[in-house]
Amino acid sequence: MATIVRRIGTSPRARGSASGQTCPDIFELSDGNFAVIGTDVTDALDSALPGDASRADYERIVVVTRETLLSAKADIPDA
């Protein structure tokens, strides 16, 4: 199992989540993949996926805030 190497972008607290109630986050893993903490919206968006998109039963559709992804942009490697 891969381990978390580092956070990508700023922490939720740095983005203004003092309460810990809204904590979307992105992490780089030791195997080069990324892990995302977001809101599970699979039930709401599954039927809206484009025809050339699909997900396995063990996959979920999650949403992270625009702010979370934009704060991570500078930390995401180009290759």
Image (tube, rainbow, N blue to C red):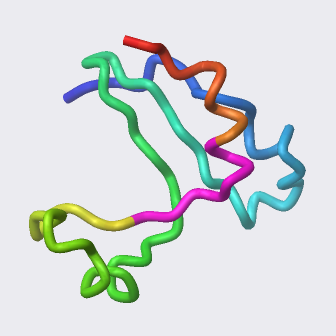
**In the visual, does 62 lie left or right of 31?**
right
6 displayed left or right of 11: left
| Residue extent of the magenta highlight | 62-69
Residue 21: percent from left, percent from top: 74, 66
Write the residue at 63% across / 32% down: 72
**28 shown above or below 11:** above
Quarter of image, res 28:
top left
Residue that appears at 62% across and 43% down: 69
Locate residue 9: give its quadrant.
top right
**Residue shown at 52%/22% (left/top)?**
76
Residue occupying image coordinates x 62% and y 29%: 73
The percent coordinates of residue 2 (x first, y second) are: 26, 25
Q: Which image quadrant: the N terminus?
A: top left
Image position, residue 60 (x, y; %): 29, 66
Q: Is residue 46 above or below residue 35?
A: below
Q: Residue furthest front?
A: 51
Q: Can you give x and y, in whole percent of width and height, for residue 71 in the image? A: 72, 35
Q: How many marks?
A: 0
Say if the magenta span includes residue 64.
yes
Left or right: residue 64 versus residue 44 is: right
Which quadrant holds residue 10? top right
Residue 16, placed above or below residue 1: below
Question: Residue 16, relative to residue 56: is it above or below?
Answer: above
Q: Is residue 52 magenta?
A: no
Quadrant (top left, top right, bottom left, bottom right) of the C terminus: top left
